[in-house]
Amino acid sequence: MNSGIAFGDDNNGFQAGTINGPVQASFYYATAQPETPPEPSIVIPFGCDDDFVERGTILEDLRTRCTASNSWTALVGLGGVGKSQLAIEHAYRTHAQSPETWVFWAHASNAARFEQSYRDIADRVKLAGRQDPQANIFKLVHDWLQGCKHRWLLVLDNVDDAGFLVERPAGNPKTGARPLRGYIPHCDRGSVLVTTRNKEAALKLVELRDIVAIRPMDMYSARALLHKKLGTQADSSSIAELATALEYMPLAIVQAAAYILQRSPRYSVVRYLDDYRKNERKRTSLLKFDDGQLRRDWEATNSIIVTWQISFEYIQQTRPSAAELLSLMSFFDRQGIPEELLRHRGKQENNDGDQQGPTRVADIDVEEDDVSQSSTSVESDEDTFEDDVVALRNFCFVSDEIGGTSFEMHALVQLATRTWLAANSRLERWKQQFIGKLNAAFPTGAYENWAVCGPLFAHVKAAAEQRPKDERVLIEWAALLYHAAWYAEQRGNVAEARELAMASLKTRQKVLGEEHEDTLRSVAMVGLVYKLGGRWDDAEMLEVQVMETHKKKLGADHPSTLTSINNLA
């Protein structure tokens, strides 16, 4: 069979028929053309925020810190407090004030996203070799930053767990044996800005002096943000009320504004406030609304409730005892949470209805070794408690009050915690423990107990909003409210005494029955409150009811009957 190939122009070639020997062919990629290095620019996945509101001197402080040579700074605060928004604004202002400065943004929630951010940087600055699948992209970017002739700012956003940055990678040939933290260079022309919810993570990257604590907005900034988001939708007084209700938390404010605007004109700030104040379930529903903030990472939720629950899950996994402490604290009033009621939380059964009481120890010979072990156990409990407090403080969920024997929390954090507990079928368990501890600590309302009752009274009012389901705990709850009503009545606080006394009475009537002695005590307490409020006829009617029941059950000469008769005199 004959065959042939013709080549035109100056081309030539050969044709081989049968080849019995080896044939070797070599192919070569065309030499890559060198790319023109780009001019400095801002490489950030978010647009500038026209609704941004100044927050005191934070941005000026950031500018001062980040213009220093080789600076590393961390913004630390609650999720939703506005750390990333501050970083975005700082990034744009940096480039506007210094166009010759490179500004980069790296998502640093995990190793995969951090690597992708470095690849995006390599593409933007057109690094040679970046498309080689065997290339160490971290080293390429590191070396370029190290040798860059221009100033640069690198934002590491959302470093809530710095473990992937500081620990030696296992089995990843692209990084070598070097921790990823080593690929973020220290150099005179560079500055690094970290955002994180976790102070512990920040301290793995920066010095304590380089941490900037970000707290909720002040009243004026929060109102200004609402005005910008809502425009003419509301008057100043309702704006102020809403800002206060949301504790000046930026994400919650933006979320609420988006909710209102989506339903306008059939919905208003006043109606939102009415719904928000109805009950805990409605508040939770409003705060779960997941919309409003365009300048958040796609992994991040716009719901303030869900934002914090992500951190709760992290604490649950890394330090379960701290999650337990947070769970218990979420039921107290937000201020003046007493340390003495938080220690020795004890073990709980998974079943909400079952709690294991303390073991009774009597007539047992105690050896020296037992005493030593007990002492060690107490010290261990002390250490555990302090470490738990540190863990919660690191996430900005709790803070110490002056004096160091009590704590405070944001009410929204408490609500988010209880919502998380309910979603995980643990709400009743911790509600029961809270009520039990508070009932054991709150004495009668007699004058000699006022010094104890006073600091605990706000927590009893919080407990009044947390009616338990378990009948045994309901009895404790009613006793707690009864004693608190006694205290309020003795202090002349008619409204709160009446509310607490009535709640105690209704519960005891339902659980214990109309003629139970504790129920009659609650009836008598309501009568005393009626007297205090000038409702003499109503008070007399209740006192007669108590007397008649005592006479019927105990006889006319019983001390309780005689006391009832005396009260009528």
Image (cartoon, rainbow, N blue to C red):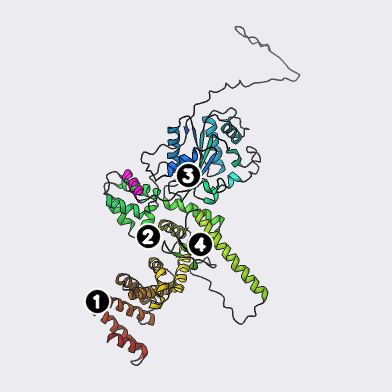
Q: Nearer the viewer, residue 127 or 42?
A: 42
- Numbered circle sitting on residue 325: 4
Amino acid of disc 2? Glu
Dominant secondary-structure state across the stretch colored magenta: helix
N-terminal of the two: label 1 or label 4? 4
> What residue sits right under mark 3 in the picture?
299
Looking at the rendered image, the disc whose residue lies closer to the viewer, 3 or 1, is 1
N-terminal of the two: label 3 or label 4? 3
Let me know if residue 121 appears in the view: yes
> What residue sits right under mark 1 in the picture?
535
Let me know if residue 477 appears in the view: no
The question of residue 228 being in magenta is answered with: yes
Amino acid of disc 1? Arg
Q: Are marks 3 and 4 in contact (CB under 8 Å)?
A: no
Considering every residue shown, the one lying at the far right of the view is 21
Amino acid of disc 4? Leu
Name the quadrant containing residue 469: bottom left
Helix, strand, or loop for circle 1?
loop
Helix, strand, or loop for circle 4?
helix
Amino acid of disc 3? Glu
Q: How many marks overall?
A: 4
| Residue 363 position in % (x across, y down) | 61, 82
Looking at the rendered image, the disc whose residue lies closer to the viewer, 2 or 1, is 1
Residue visible at 62% across and 32% down?
135
Q: Quadrant of the C terminus?
A: bottom left
Q: Which residues are magenta?
A: 219-230
> What residue sits right under mark 2 in the picture?
280
Q: Are marks 2 and 4 in contact (CB under 8 Å)?
A: no
Looking at the rendered image, the disc whose residue lies closer to the viewer, 2 or 4, is 4
Q: Are marks 3 and 1 in contact (CB under 8 Å)?
A: no
- Numbered circle sitting on residue 242: none
Q: Quadrant of the N terminus?
A: top right
